[in-house]
Image (cartoon, rainbow, N blue to C red):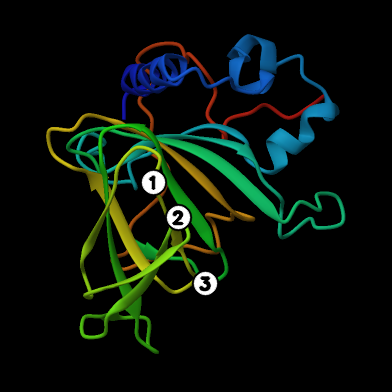
């Protein structure tokens, strides 16, 4: 992706957050220049990859496959002695036409919440013992305190305010219901580790390759300079 595309995506998400009157922690507002002076007191942000994030899954088709997000809080499974949080929280922003590919988590359980905007569609499958899609058996899903059973591969619609619980080994993808507008998504989960706990049905990447055609508006969570 071009840096200008990343900057535009971050500003678009930032505007929707403002429109829905959500306040972000201070580190989300730091400029790249300000990050140069931040010391070890911000190591939790660096070590746990808090802050702004863009994924195009390494495919270079962000407007079709990808979305914007912010990790607000997170523990660290590899540094439990230093960071003892057992939970994480994110905000995600997905536009009409974008798609988050099919995957499950070996360890993490998460709630996906439609915080506002359009309607979110989440397709669900159980997984087989060999981690393939179970295209036969129904899926038990929990929606805001209600348990329902849906056919394998069904899309569950979340209107604003609604949520779904995603259990380990439950395949899921998501996209916006066409014509309903972008969605601001909340995610509340156990500790998040994108490097070790994402099992994508088809092998894909994570972070975009960046072409620097302008200065960054915000640093992404994998771009922070080390503390001096």
Q: Quadrant of the C terminus?
A: top right
Locate residue 23, reporting x and y percent. Answer: 58, 19
Q: Residue furthest front?
A: 146
Q: Nearer the viewer, residue 198 or 179?
A: 179
- Report if the CB atoms under discs 1 and 2 are less than 8 Å apart: yes
Q: Secondary structure at mark 2?
A: loop
Q: Residue at x 40, y 89 (%)?
A: 129
Task: Return the disc, 1 or 2, that comes first in the chain's sequence.
Answer: 2
Mark 1 lies on residue: 162
- The residue that mark 2 highlights is 144
- Label 1, label 2: how far apart the Cα atoms are: 7 Å
Residue 128 is left or right of residue 194, and the answer is: left
Question: Image quadrant for the N terminus?
Answer: top left
Q: Which residue shows up at 80% across the image and 49% down it?
A: 83
Residue 100, visible in the rendered structure = no
Disc 1 vs disc 3: Cβ atoms closer than 8 Å? no
Q: Tell me the element at label 3.
A: loop
Q: Earlier in the sequence, mark 3 or mark 2?
A: 3
Q: Which residue is mark 3?
A: 106
Q: Secondary structure at mark 1?
A: loop
User: Pointer 3: residues within 10 angstroms few (<14), some, or many (20+)?
Assistant: few
Quarter of the rendering containing residue 119: top left
Distance between mark 1 and mark 3 Cα atoms = 24 Å
**Is residue 74 visible to us here?**
yes
Count the marks: 3
In x, y percent, where is residue 3? 37, 21
Q: Nearer the viewer, mark 1 or mark 3?
A: 1
Residue 67 higher or lower than 175, as above or below:
above
Image-based side of 170 in relation to 62, left or right: right
Tell me which residue sits at (52%, 54%) in the image.
194
* Disc number placed over residue 75 in the picture, else none: none
């Amino acid at each position: 992706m071009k840096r200008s595309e990343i900057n535009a995506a971050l500003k678009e998400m930032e505007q929707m957050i403002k429109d829905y009157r959500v306040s972000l922690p201070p580190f989300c507002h730091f400029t790249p220049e300000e990050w140069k002076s931040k010391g070890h007191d911000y190591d939790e942000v660096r070590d746990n990859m808090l802050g702004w994030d863009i994924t195009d899954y390494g495919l270079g088709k962000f407007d079709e496959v990808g979305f914007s997000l912010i990790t607000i809080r997170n523990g660290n499974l590899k540094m439990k002695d230093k960071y003892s949080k057992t939970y994480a929280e994110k905000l995600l922003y997905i536009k009409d036409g974008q798609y988050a590919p099919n995957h499950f988590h070996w360890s993490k359980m998460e709630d996906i919440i439609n915080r506002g905007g359009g309607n979110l569609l989440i397709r669900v499958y159980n997984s087989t013992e060999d981690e393939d899609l179970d295209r036969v058996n129904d899926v038990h899903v929990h929606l805001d305190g209600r348990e329902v059973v849906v056919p394998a591969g069904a899309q569950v619609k979340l209107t604003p305010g609604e949520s779904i619980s995603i259990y380990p080994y439950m395949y899921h993808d998501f996209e916006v219901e066409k014509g309903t507008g972008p969605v601001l998504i909340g995610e509340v989960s156990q500790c998040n580790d994108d490097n070790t706990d994402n099992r994508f049905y088809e092998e894909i990447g994570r972070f975009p390759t960046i072409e620097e055609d302008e200065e960054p508006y915000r640093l992404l969570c994998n771009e922070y300079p080390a503390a001096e």
